[in-house]
Image (tube, helix red, strand yellow):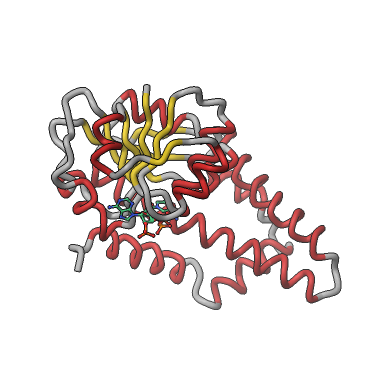
Amino acid sequence: MILGILGVGHLASAILAGLVRSGITDTILLSPRGKAVEIAARYGLEVCRDARDLVVRADVVLLAVRPADAASAVAGLPWRTGQVVVSVCAGVPLGDLPVAPARLSRAMPLTAAEINASPTIFFPDIPEARQLVERIGPAMALRSEQEFEVATVNAAIYGWAQDLIRRSAEWCTQQGTDPQTMRQLVAQTFVAAGRLIAEKDQSMEAMLTELVTPGGITELGLQVLADRGQPQAWQAACEAVLSKLTAEPA
Ligand SMILES: NC(=O)c1ccc[n+]([C@@H]2O[C@H](COP(=O)([O-])OP(=O)(O)OC[C@H]3O[C@@H](n4cnc5c(N)ncnc54)[C@H](OP(=O)(O)O)[C@@H]3O)[C@@H](O)[C@H]2O)c1
């Protein structure tokens, strides 16, 4: 199998790092522009002459250009039957990408692909797309494009979680604690919170009821957050992202 990467920027770099870590043996071709030359040198990959050359040679094409560039990047290229395109372009519907007769799937990786820890949603469930995203972390097939769009909000939540980790660690450091220790402690606490929910069958409501001791510190903090507009502020942020994702491109 030959994998072609069309759009070699920030996300493609993270995905490539994960693919290489996963022990991929397929040939990987890169489109020119962006970080292509640097990445090609790092992993010993070939940079194609242009996007047409890449599409002619690749069996599976990962499309990772910016959303506004997606439709024009794939238009007029020699797509063929049997080929698969996996688009990671946020908010770009399947119907906006003229790649027929190639089959098309959308995926939404996180930069944790770099360490093979990206939970990656994809739709529709095409075997070649599944095989690709499984290499960079847990793959999650969704049931419809509408469901995919809502779940794409999680890609922004990932960044908010990192911001919360940073702010929490910085606050601890301002109180005189060691920055590296606090970075590790807070980050590993978020990992622990996520893993426990992901790996237990118990309802989240029941888990939190057990966790939040009446009169305890967790309850106190939740009350302060509620007084300052949580969870409404968080929900408003999710709504804003979904509106942006589903808006017609300017
Ligand atoms: N960053 C993330 O964490 C993340 C997460 C999930 C999904 N995504 C999605 O991934 C896509 C890429 O995001 P990014 O952050 O990686 O953006 P980026 O760093 O700007 O990378 C996009 C790359 O595509 C290149 N490009 C644009 N048009 C091209 C064309 N016609 N042929 C070949 N290359 C072309 C650009 O080259 P030039 O610099 O020369 O223009 C640039 O190197 C976006 O659609 C985004 O929604 C990103």
Residue at (54, 78) in percent of width and height: 228
Looking at the image, residue 243 sits to the left or right of residue 223; the answer is: left
What x and y, as percent, mark residue 140?
Answer: 41, 34
| Total numbered labels | 0
Report the front residue among 203 and 176: 176
Residue at (39, 69) in percent of width and height: 236
Report the front residue among 53 and 11: 53
Looking at the image, residue 82 sits to the left or right of residue 236; the answer is: left
Q: Is residue 182 visible?
A: yes
Q: Quadrant of the N terminus?
A: top left
Residue at (47, 54) in percent of width and height: 10
Vertically, is 154 above or below 177? above
Looking at the image, residue 245 sits to the left or right of residue 198; the answer is: left
Vertically, is 110 above or below 67? above
Report the front residue among 20 and 200: 20
What x and y, as percent, mark residue 21?
Answer: 59, 33
Q: Is residue 205 visible?
A: no
What x and y, as percent, mark residue 126?
Answer: 29, 27
